Image (cartoon, rainbow, N blue to C red):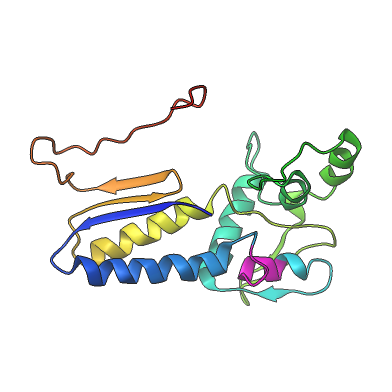
Amino acid sequence: GTVIDVMIQHEKAEEILEQVDNQLRENEIRFSANNDKSELMAVNLHAGKEWVNVHPSLFKLIELGKHHSVASNSFLNISIGPLTKVWRIGFPDGRKPQESEITTLLEQIDPSRIQLDSKTRSVYLEKGMSLDLGALAKGYIADIIVEDLKKQGVQSALINLGGNVVTFGSAPNKQRKEWRIGIKNPRETE
């Protein structure tokens, strides 16, 4: 459901953009908290049942997310899945849950209870827990794409993954070398 824009300057732009498209689709299957067939959903669906071995990039992001989620004074919490599910954030039928629902679910969103085994790249969640990497995944994926584009000799690019924008190099505008990024005022309709 995310709008994605990728612009690059390279003599083999079409070929490289096709690779980027494949990377994005592969990462969607890996990181999505809304796709029952994603690797992340496999972790969530096996909560309280068994350890789940995951791809190195998913393990790295969960590990990074847990580290920052348990840090003092952090507002990040990748174990917020139970709340986002009941709230239906990002879906047309979204709603504000009853206070009693929220209170009950708060007991299930303790990131310190995420168990990680770095030797086997496995994740274990207690029953009722659920991960949501939405606060991290798009930025992480954009960083991976930038790294790959630079390795392929791309000199300039703009990557917009649903509002997570990364640029490098010069903008393709002859009069202006800087990228111009507009940010919508959330209080305005246009």
Tell which of 44 and 18 is nearer to you: 18
Report whether 64 appears left or right of 46: left
Residue 24: within the magenta? no
Picture layout, residue 98 above or below residue 113: above
Examine the rendering and report whether any part of residue 123 can be seen.
no
Q: Specify whether 30 is left or right of 141.
A: right
Work out which quarter of the rendered image holds the C terminus and state it: top left
- The answer to whether residue 14 is left or right of residue 108 is left
Q: Hey, which residue is sitting farthest top in the picture?
A: 187
Please say if 172 is above or below 10. above
Relative image position of residue 107 (x, y in whole percent)? 85, 46
Residue ranking furthest to the left? 174
Residue at the image position 68 percent from the left and 68 percent from the top: 36
Instruction: Report the magenta residues as a range.
Output: 35-43
The residue at 36%/61% (across/down) is 145
Spot occupied by residue 133 in the image (x, y as percentages of width and height): 60, 54
User: Looking at the image, which is closer to me, 149 or 70?
Assistant: 149
All told, the count of numbered labels is 0
x then y, percent, for residue 179: 23, 39
83 in relation to 57, above or below: above
Q: Mark yes or no: residue 110 visible.
A: yes
Name the residue at 40% across, 55% down.
142
Residue at 20% from the left image edge and 65% from the top image edge: 13
Q: Position of residue 35 (x, y in %)?
A: 64, 65
Q: Which of the 4 quarters of the picture holds residue 127?
A: bottom right
> Does the magenta run of residues contain 41?
yes
Q: Is residue 165 above or below residue 10?
A: above
